[in-house]
Image (cartoon, rainbow, N blue to C red):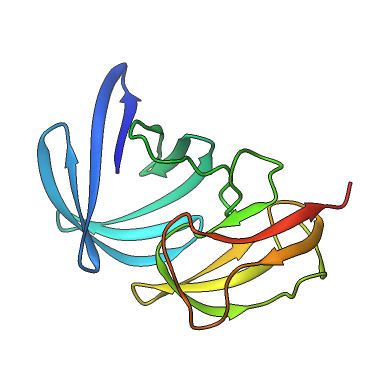
Amino acid sequence: MKLVYKHNAQTNTLDIERAGDDFEIEINGERAQVQVISFVPPRVTFLYNGKIVDARVADEGKKRWAHVDGATFVLERVDARTPRGHSHGAREGTGSGIVVAPMPGQVRGVLVSEGAAVAEGQPLVILEAMKMEVKVSAPHDGVVARLFVTQGQSVEREQVLGEIQSSQ
C-alpha cells in the first residue's frame, strides 16, 4: 500500500508491504523492518529500528490519521484500491452500512445475527490475524440486514462482512 503524508511542510511517500508476520516499509527510499507487537484498534505497538513505538491510528475516507511520539500525521492513500470509510469497518463513506474487514484474517466469532438491532460501535465480528484479535464494529445504529461470513471463514482485506440498515 502506498501512502503520502506531509510533515514539516515536506511531502513524504510511505510504502508498506507485508513480510510474513511483519512489515517492510519504505519512507522516501529508505527501507526498514517493522515488527508488530500489539494491535488493538485504534492502538498499535511495534518495533521500528530497535525502538518500541506506540501509535494510535484512525481512518477517515482516503485519509489515515496516525499519532506517533507526540506528532500527528495525516496519511493519504495514493494507490487505486477502494478506500475504507470508517475505522470500525464501514465502506463508502461515513453513514454507509456496508461493513468490511480491515485486514485479512480468519473469522473467530460472529457476535450478531441477521435482524438484530445494533448500536454504533457495537462489536459484530471478531477477526484473528497475526496472533491478534480485531473487533469489527457497527458503523451506526441500525439492524443487521445481512451477514456474509461465518465462524472459521477466511476473509481478505476489505471483504464485505455484512450490512447494517440504518434505523433512522
Say which quarter of the image contains residue 29.
top left
Q: Quadrant of residue 15?
A: top left
Q: Residue furthest left?
A: 30
From the viewer's perspective, tell me whether residue 37 is left or right of residue 128: left
- Foreground pick, 8 / 82: 82
User: Looking at the image, which residue sits at the far top?
Assistant: 9
Q: Residue at x 34, y 28 (%)?
A: 5
Q: Is residue 48 left or right of residue 7?
A: left
**Residue 110: x, y in percent?**
63, 77
Residue 26 horizontal side relative to residue 126, left or right:
left
Q: Quadrant of residue 99?
A: bottom right
Q: Name, please, the residue furthest toward the bottom.
A: 152
| Residue placed most toward the observer, 57 or 115 | 115
Q: Is residue 53 above or below residue 58?
A: below
Residue depicted at 35% across the width and 44% down the height: 69
Is residue 107 positioned above or below 60 on the image? Answer: below
**In front of the other: 124 or 150:** 150
Q: What residue lies at 46% left-to-right and 48% top-to-bottom?
A: 57
- Percent across and percent down for residue 52 are 26, 59
**Position in image of residue 160 (x %, y %):** 55, 58
Instruction: Relative to 58, say whether 102 is above or below.
Output: below
